[in-house]
């Protein structure tokens, strides 16, 4: 059985996608310990694929219930692949979650939804450059036109990839020092970033007090270097990357798409 999780912002079209892909094969329950609805379903086209729907979220902080449920799932029972559904008309806002998801190290592809709306508004995204700059496959999708949905799942099953995003050299230096303190063979960047931010919960029970103090020390030094607080540093670095990606991929065709298209 291959599990593929659908993750995206609220209103990206995720429920519509989920319903089309799993129609009449759905299971609805709750996430462990909370009253957040959990939906999964067998992929209509390929019964060996289980599609796991996650709550619509803008980020993966531990502060909101929907985000915590999503984060715990990705950390504790990672799916085989993620389809990050992105509303193409809100690409810039969506990329924040995308960058966080990449840090989990779970194979992933981007399902770029609402492409019909992009066309009718005469807006263009350079999909090849988006794919190149994120290091992930991007599938253009439209729920309205029933376009690209199966392709996204098929590609996620066959050919999802782990991307790596790199931030400012000063932040990267701190992250690698933190990694040395943790001394684990495989550590997802998400846990490293969280530790840098002072949140050790993704590394539950793995760190002793000395290690935590050492990491706090690294954080303080980095905060001095940036003259900013850790949480702000991370947010700013992500936005800086998003701006770079947007400059590369956002284009305006200058003409409105045809209505018959
Ligand atoms: P969710 O909040 O991510 O589950 O989003 P929904 O599936 O509820 O979709 C939000 C709205 O966008 C609904 O009105 C959908 O019909 C609409 N929608 C979803 N995908 C598309 C699409 O590809 N094109 C267009 N035009 N509308 C879409
Ligand atoms: K909705």
Image (cartoon, grey):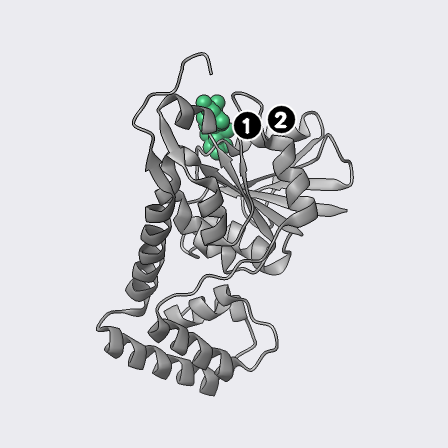
Task: State if disc 1 and disc 2 touch (CB < 8 Å).
Answer: yes
Query: Is residue 127 found left or right of 234 in the rendered image?
Result: right
- Up the image or down, 119 lies above or below 55; here it is above
Instruction: Say which residue label 1 marks.
Output: 16
Front in this rendered view, residue 135 or 58: 135
Q: Residues within 10 Å of mark 1 (few under 14, many from 20)?
A: few
Q: Indicate yes or no: mark 1 CB to ligand 1 under 8 Å.
A: yes
Question: Residue 49: in sight, yes or no?
Answer: yes
Residue 219 placement (x, y as % from top left): 34, 77
Marks counted in the figure total 2
Outermost residue to the bottom: 210
Residue 228 placement (x, y as % from top left): 24, 70
Residue 38, image quadrant: top right
Q: Residue at x 49, y 64 (%)?
A: 190
Q: Residues within 10 Å of mark 2 (few under 14, many from 20)?
A: some
Residue 196 placement (x, y as % from top left): 40, 72
Q: Residue at x 46, y 87 (%)?
A: 210
Q: Residue at x 61, y 45 (%)?
A: 5
Alpha carbons under labels 2 and 1: distance apart: 6 Å
Query: Is residue 203 found left or right of 221 in the rendered image?
Result: right
SS for callout 1:
helix
- Up the image or down, 44 lies above or below 66; here it is above
Q: Residue at x 71, y 34 (%)?
A: 43
Front in this rendered view, residue 106 or 253: 253
Question: Residue 66: in sight, yes or no?
Answer: no
Instruction: Say which residue label 2 marks.
Output: 20
SS for callout 2:
helix
Outermost residue to the left: 227
Query: Is residue 61 found left or right of 228 in the rendered image?
Result: right
Residue 98 placement (x, y as % from top left): 46, 50
């Amino acid at each position: 059985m291959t599990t593929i999780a659908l993750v995206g912002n609220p209103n990206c079209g995720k429920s519509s996608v989920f319903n089309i892909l799993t129609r009449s094969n759905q299971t609805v329950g709750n996430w462990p310990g909370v009253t957040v609805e959990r939906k999964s379903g067998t992929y209509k086209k390929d019964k060996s694929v289980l599609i796991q729907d996650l709550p619509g979220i803008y980020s993966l902080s531990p502060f909101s219930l929907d985000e915590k449920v999503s984060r715990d799932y990705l950390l504790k029972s990672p799916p085989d692949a993620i389809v990050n559904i992105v509303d193409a008309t809100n690409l810039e806002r969506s990329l924040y979650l995308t960058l966080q998801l990449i840090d989990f190290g779970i194979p992933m592809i981007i399902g770029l939804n609402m492409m019909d709306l992009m066309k009718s508004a005469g807006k263009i995204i350079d999909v090849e450059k988006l794919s190149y700059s994120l290091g992930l496959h991007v599938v253009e999708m439209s729920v309205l036109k029933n376009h690209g949905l199966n392709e996204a799942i098929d590609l996620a099953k066959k050919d999802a990839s782990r991307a790596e995003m790199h931030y400012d050299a000063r932040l990267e230096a701190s992250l690698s020092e933190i990694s040395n303190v943790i001394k684990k063979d495989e550590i997802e960047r998400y846990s490293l970033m969280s530790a840098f931010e002072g949140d050790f919960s993704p590394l539950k029970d793995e760190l002793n007090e000395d290690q935590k103090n050492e990491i706090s020390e690294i954080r303080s030094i980095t905060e001095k270097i940036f003259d900013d607080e850790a949480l702000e540093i991370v947010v700013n670095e992500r936005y800086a990357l998003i701006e770079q990606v947007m400059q590369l991929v956002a284009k305006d065709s200058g003409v409105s798409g045809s209505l018959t298209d």
